[in-house]
Image (cartoon, coloured by chain):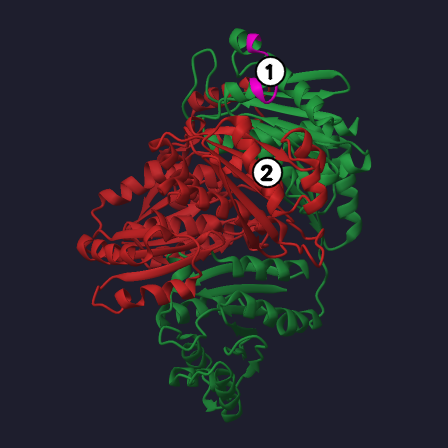
Chain colours: A green, B red
Amino acid sequence: MNVSLLTIGNEILSGDTINSNVAWISRSLSEIGCSIQTQITVPDVEKPIVKTLNQLLNDGPAFVIITGGLGPTTDDITRNVLFNFVGTGSEFDEDYWDKMKKRFEKYDMDIPESNRSQALIPTNGHIIPNPVGSARGFLFRKENTVIISLPGVPSEMKVMMNESIIPMIKEEGLAPIFNKTLRTVGIPESALIEKIEPVLNTNHGCNLGYYPSIFGVDIKISHSDEGPVENLSNDIYKILGVSIYGEGKVSLEDVVIQLAKNKNKTVSTAESCTGGLIGHRLTEVSGSSDVYKGGLVVYSNESKMNMLGVEKDILEAHGAVSEETAESMARNVKNKFNTDYGISVTGIAGPTGGTDEKPVGLVYIGMAKKGRVKVKEFHFGTNRKRNKLRTSHVALNWLRLSLLH
Amino acid sequence: MNVSLLTIGNEILSGDTINSNVAWISRSLSEIGCSIQTQITVPDVEKPIVKTLNQLLNDGPAFVIITGGLGPTTDDITRNVLFNFVGTGSEFDEDYWDKMKKRFEKYDMDIPESNRSQALIPTNGHIIPNPVGSARGFLFRKENTVIISLPGVPSEMKVMMNESIIPMIKEEGLAPIFNKTLRTVGIPESALIEKIEPVLNTNHGCNLGYYPSIFGVDIKISHSDEGPVENLSNDIYKILGVSIYGEGKVSLEDVVIQLAKNKNKTVSTAESCTGGLIGHRLTEVSGSSDVYKGGLVVYSNESKMNMLGVEKDILEAHGAVSEETAESMARNVKNKFNTDYGISVTGIAGPTGGTDEKPVGLVYIGMAKKGRVKVKEFHFGTNRKRNKLRTSHVALNWLRLSLLH
């Protein structure tokens, strides 16, 4: 079932407000099998609203859902414009006006006259109740399309979608859509697709989407039946193996904490260039205290020596950003916190502070477990915040892989 | 100057990704005086892309800015569609291909053949360099409109906007808009507006916008002349004083690090429920190593005792989440790291782990300086991630206010 979304509001066009409403509606409707054709935002001005509605109706979607512009102030023009557009008269709803008046009285306030517009109901259309606010919604039929108008306040829009619109759309008898998102780490998008090409070229019948970010690539598989999604997903798992760290919305830190919990392992961290980010990410997970015992942020040579016991000789001979320092940091933090794993990070986050020998983006990550310490060297970019994020991600992924073995 | 924005991407239409790109572009261009006419999102499908481009060009905006669909995979069709739409041929850029190959070699990988598409350049159009990724942008002129195509990866899009597109649009001679954003912390939006009402009711002639977030409220003042912006801003400063921590895009951690640098003060942290977030935020600032010496993440009673020297008696008598523990943590971390300030945090981040006496959201923050330790008690909500963020923000703001005195 095709749906088009129209947002009316200057604050969205100016970028002062992120249009999270449209993402929420799109996701809610996609999950029940609707196909969102387009999302359009126009200003609180009659001409572009009418022009866009005409263009949208021209494509004949089953539903056009409009948000915004139903407030009581003069720049809220959606109600008037829509009544004109569908050619309906209006009546004043005395009962609703009384209700609104009483609501204001509860807060010891006189109701402003400007709220009268919110008591108007179309003679040729329907009202959509708003259980949490005063701006009710509207429903009209024009040509083959149902036009729905909802307020832009997210909490009100969501209740009205959940209680009125989604149940109504579901009744139209949608074909369900099954989907699964595989979250991968460590392989660039193009290389990933090359790897799974053999199964992509089979007759799987699924739709695929690839969503790369600094953390890895998500692969979203969808189909109107569950079987093909499962089959393709299984085939991709066979190729990518542990490069897939989870499904759906699970985060890498969720997976690490769950794995460590299952194996009854504990973790500590010694962070230099990430400054506490790895600890922060681990503790985003509820219940992480069973696994994560704590760590040290050692942002100076003194703290590396005094707090973590990194030998002065090592720092002088090899420098703070070196394999030797990372090794000592990982070993010592594991011992000090008495954990199964000790992770260390030292590097040059940038944008300044690099040398020819040790450029910005050079990072060493250490991993101590059972008396053994391994250190890996990485070369990231020059952006400080990205370097911190990538370092934390690589470290968490290494911990995940260690926990798997 | 009129600008229309077109986003190409199924992940936006399905609601899997929030379209933060379009808000960022809109805001950046509104600030330099552009007027955003419309924002449209369409799928990675040729027909709706071409149809929408025709509709957009029909309105004759100065610029159409397109994001998305420039990746190397088969669902990235923007490049081909645009080349057809503007009627340009293409050439293969051997130099760029060599560059990309070398970039992959750095990571010990062979470049996939699918990346070849990213080396195509239009014979009748221009390349927009991408300093941080492999998908370059394009610029075409058609009718009276400049069409610009950028990758959808936010970090790449932003660099290209800042380095190429915004300077170019500025050169077109826009009527300037002056604006200033005052960043406030610690006052809810409605109370803030009530406080500054006396100056709001003067004849200042400026436009005002209020942007509340978990971190505070930003007040944006704009006018076509600089004088009224400065006057109103000064009047608001007189009322809000130190509740304004900075202007523009400066972050609270930027301000804290700069203040501490100016006063030659050093800082250490002892974090329990924030898990390293305060250290992470401080080290987001380049040059923070002059100020931040490091800290301890003590996520268990053992680590609070063994690593930080919190007395067992205190933990047993008052619990880990208590004024007494926060006090001991702040004093001890300051001494251990030998810094001017020691900040501590202990609390129940949630969503579980609370009791009647110590509910989820209870947080103690300690601040040690010059032999004195103060502790404050806070009651936040039940959302773990928000509690961590709010705690870190309150702690950083307290540090800022301490540094001011």
Q: Position of residue B112 (x, y in %)?
A: 58, 26
Task: State the residue at coordinates (41%, 72%).
Answer: A50
Residue of label 2: B328
Q: Callout 2, which amino acid?
A: Ser
Task: Say which of A86 and B398 sits in front.
Answer: B398
Viewer-closest of A246 and B343:
B343
The chain holding disc 2 is B
The residue at the point 67 percent across, 43 percent down is B320
* Residue B38 figure quarter: bottom left
Q: Measured from the top left, where is residue A330 in percent x and y?
A: 65, 21
Residue where numbered disc 1 is placed: A310
Q: Amino acid at mark 1?
A: Val
Q: Are marks 1 and 2 on the same chain?
A: no
Q: Relative to A72, is A190 on the left or the right?
A: right
Image position, residue A45 (x, y; %): 35, 70
Residue at disc 1, secondary structure: loop
Q: Residue A42's image quarter?
A: bottom left
Q: Which residues are magenta?
A: A305-313
Q: Going by the image, does A54 lie left or right of A156?
A: left
Using the image, name the chain to which the residue with label 1 belongs. Answer: A
Q: Are marks 1 and 2 in contact (CB under 8 Å)?
A: no
Is B297 included in the stretch rendered in magenta?
no
Which quadrant holds the C terminus of chain B? top left
Tell me if I can see residue B326 in this picture.
yes
In terms of depth relative to the viewer, which is nearer, B19 or B352?
Answer: B352
* Mark closer to the observer (1, 2): 2
- Residue B57 position by quadrant: bottom left
Q: Is residue B88 above or below residue B144?
A: above
B106 above or below A129? above
Mark 2 residue element: helix
